[in-house]
Structures are given as C-alpha cells and as structure tokens.
Amino acid sequence: MRMYDIILKKRNGEVLSKEEINHFIDGYTKGSVPDYQAAALLMAIYFQKMDKEETAYLTEAMMNSGEVIDLSNIEGIKVDKHSTGGVGDKTTIALGPIVAACGVPVAKFSGRGLGHTGGTIDKLESIPGFSVDMTKEEFVNNVNNVKLAVGGQTANLAPADKKLYALRDVTTTVDNISLIAGSIMSKKLASGADAIVLDVKTGSGAFMQDIDDSFELAKEMVDIGINMGRNTVAVVTDMDQPLGYTIGNSLEVKEAIELLQGKGPKDLEELCITLGSYMLLLAQQVSSVDEGRVKIKEAIYSGKALETLKRFIVNQGGDVAYIENVDLLPKAKEVYPLKVTEDGYIHKIKADIVGMSALILGAGRDTKDSVIDLSVGIVLNKKVGDYVKKGEVLAYIHSNNIDRRNNAIEKLKTAYDIEKTKPSTKPLVFGIVTEKEIKRL
C-alpha cells in the first residue's frame, strides 16, 4: 500500500477504506509517512471531504494510535463532558462536583489551555497544592471515593491527533468538519468514558461561529460516539458573549465556587443544569431530562455539590481554605474600571475580543512555553441586553502590568456594540442532538 495511491484516490473524490486510513495514521504516527504526504492528504480531505464511515475510521485509528485508558475498575456508568471551547467557560469546575454529588462517576482528563485563558487544570491550579499528578490506581480510587477526579492528558493519548493537528494548523486545513470531529472524539474515546455529553459552542467566541456548522459538527460527533459504542448527546449553546461574568483563571474559579454556593450567574447555572441533566440521563440515574434538572438543582442548592468540590480538591492536594474563602485566591495588583461613553443598550459583547483582551493581560498562553498569570483577567459588569448610562462601569480589568492593561483596554473597548434600541433576546441553548434527532429549540 502506497501513500501516493491513497492521496490520489482522495484527491479524485473517492472513498478511502479502513485499511488505507489505518495505513496513513499508523505511518504518520511512527514517522514513515513524511509531513509533505500527510499535508497533501489533509488538503485532499479538506476539499473532497469524508463521509461518515471514513470519519469513523479516522477517529478510531487516531484513538488507537496511543493509550486507550481502561476505567473498568471505576464503579458505575462513567460520563464525560467536553466543550468545544469558549470565553469564560469554567463549566467543568462547577459541573463535575454537581454531577458527582448526584452519584455519577466523573473521570475527567483535561489539557492545559493554549489561548485566551488557561485550561481547566490551569484554573484549578489557582488553588495552592492542587495537582493532577496521580498514579492510575490513585485516579481510580479518587473517582470511586469522591465520584470525581481530574487528571492530565498523557502524551500517549491519541498521539496521531497531536501530530495531525499541528500539521493542520500550519497548512490551513483546520476547519473541516470530519477532521475537527475526529480530533475531538479520538481523545474523548481514548479517555475511557462510557458515555459522552458534548457542549458545542457557536458564536463569536467559539471555534464554529456559524450555527448551522455547529449543528453539523454536533451531529458528526454524536454519530461517531454512537458508532463506537458510547451513548453520546450534544448540546449546541451560545458563545456570542462570554459565559458568566469572569474571564481569567482565579476569577473563573471564584465564579464556579459562587455557583456551588447558590449565587452564581444565571447563564452558567442554566448551562450546568442542562448539561448535568443529560449526564444523569446517560448514566441511567434518572428517567427523563426534567427529572435530571430537579436533581441537579437539588445538588447545588442543598450544598452537596460544594461539599463534593471540597473533597475533590483535598483529594488532589489542594488547600480547602481557598474554597471556603475565595478572597484568598490569587489577586491582581490593580482593578481598572472600563466606563461606557454613551447611553444605550448593549447589543453585543464580542466574546473573541474579550478573550484576546484577557490574553493581552497575561491570562492565557501565546505559546506552549508562555507563563500564565493566574490572577489577571476581566470581570464584566454588564451583559447583552442591559441598559447603560454614560459613566457606568462596563467591566473591571484586573492587571499586574500597566502596559498590558492599557493595551487590553483599547482592545476591550472594541468588543462592545451599544445602540439606542433594545436588542432581541437569544437563547443560551439552541438545540439538542441525539442519535435519533436534531432538535432545534
């Protein structure tokens, strides 16, 4: 079997076999297929696309390119949640303890962030002592004891995806539905969960900015999960403005804790309730989504989820005092109020620009080697639909460097569209994608 023939076949719009896709992924992972041939095939796939069967074969091959984690020693149906990424998305920090408090084992493997803020692990490391360094036995024991553990993704988890993504990034072949779906699902499937709930973001702060493309991606990933024997549901949600009010690592941890105290932002709470209810449904803990919503709310407002968070943090070496008193979390040296210069209604808060502003402050990584400042970020004071008067505070900028602050201010100003008329409201959840249907709300 020659790569030349595989490239030619896909270039001509033909369907690749499982053997051909396996040959490509195996060869590229081991280094026998050079970058120039892999890039040529990626470009052929980008233009000619892949059908559902090809996409499933690609995902399976990438999943099997490294370690496939065995979580069979964890009791119960293990349900994972994955977000396609957004601005202010601290959902896992709150949702994990909520679902665990309902008796569902959450065995989560997360990466570090490369972008406007850190990833889930970076954010949790705002709590002194917290660590994802565990043996497999310790990880399993933590899930069995607390129903929740967060581990770091190993270098050997879907290594083909890591190599391919780096190549896609420099050959402008990132935004292809099959390649995106295969990339995400190969890592999720290799992580060992029995069922998966996907939070597919759409809007200015999301990877997929067009809502129809977001539903297409959601359906592709659900189909892959189902075909690989994992019960999978996708929820398509809004990311046209940041989630909650905070953007920045310790700031987001604080907001997630406030949610578990029953006083978090309503959009973040609703997202956790929606995603959590489907996680309970897939774990067979409830017979309906409505029943799931009741259980999720009860876990929040009874304090059970907050207690689960504390046990989880202590189990992974963290200082629980930082949960009990969020004022101990890392703080920036100064807080600058960004004030509005005109009266009107906020029509847009462009999430991507807010994210870039946080990155300028140092809340995220430009490169893998960048050092994150856990204390800096942005706290929104107003959201879309709010009426503001000249001189009111739009947002608070938490910074440790004057030059970074000034650059962030100039960027953040461009995130807001303010008009005289009241904007129409948009839902947080646009629809649900299951094995049987695409339901737009």
Image (tube, rainbow, N blue to C red):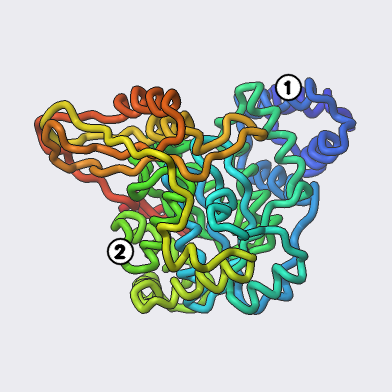
**Disc number placed over residue 263 in the picture, else none:** 2
Give the answer, above or below, for where 322 lies relative to 137: above
The residue identified by callout 1 is 40
SS assignment at label 2: loop
Residue 131, picture quadrant: bottom right
The quadrant in which residue 78 appears is: bottom right
User: Can you see residue 58?
Assistant: yes
Eyeballing the image, is 312 above or below 202? below
Q: Position of residue 299 (x, y in %)?
A: 40, 75
- The reply to whether the C-beta atoms of the residues labelled 2 and 1 are less than 8 Å apart is no
- Amino acid under disc 2: Lys
- Is 50 rendered above or below residue 196? above
Name the kind of residue labelled 1 in the image.
Ala
Q: Which mark is first along the chain, 1 or 2?
A: 1
In this rendered view, identify the residue nearer to me: 163 or 386.
386
Residue 234 position, x and y percent, is: 47, 54
Name the residue rendered at 51%, 43% in the picture.
Answer: 217
Quarter holding the N terminus is top right
| Lateral position of residue 73 relative to residue 391, left or right | right
CA neighbours of label 1 inside 10 A, class few (<14), some (14 to 19), many (20+): some
Kindly report which numbered mark, 2 or 1, lies closer to the viewer in this rendering.
2
Q: In the image, what residue occupies the spot 63% across and 36% down?
A: 50
Which type of secondary structure does the marked residue at label 1 adopt? Answer: helix
Determine whether, in the image, residue 363 is placed left or right of residue 130: left
Of 158 and 223, nearer the camera is 158
Q: Is residue 209 visible?
A: no
Instruction: Name the residue located 44 percent from the left edge and 26 percent from the top edge.
Output: 404
Q: Position of residue 171 (x, y in %)?
A: 65, 21
Real-space CA distance between mark 2 and mark 1, rounded to the nearest whole angstrom: 52 Å
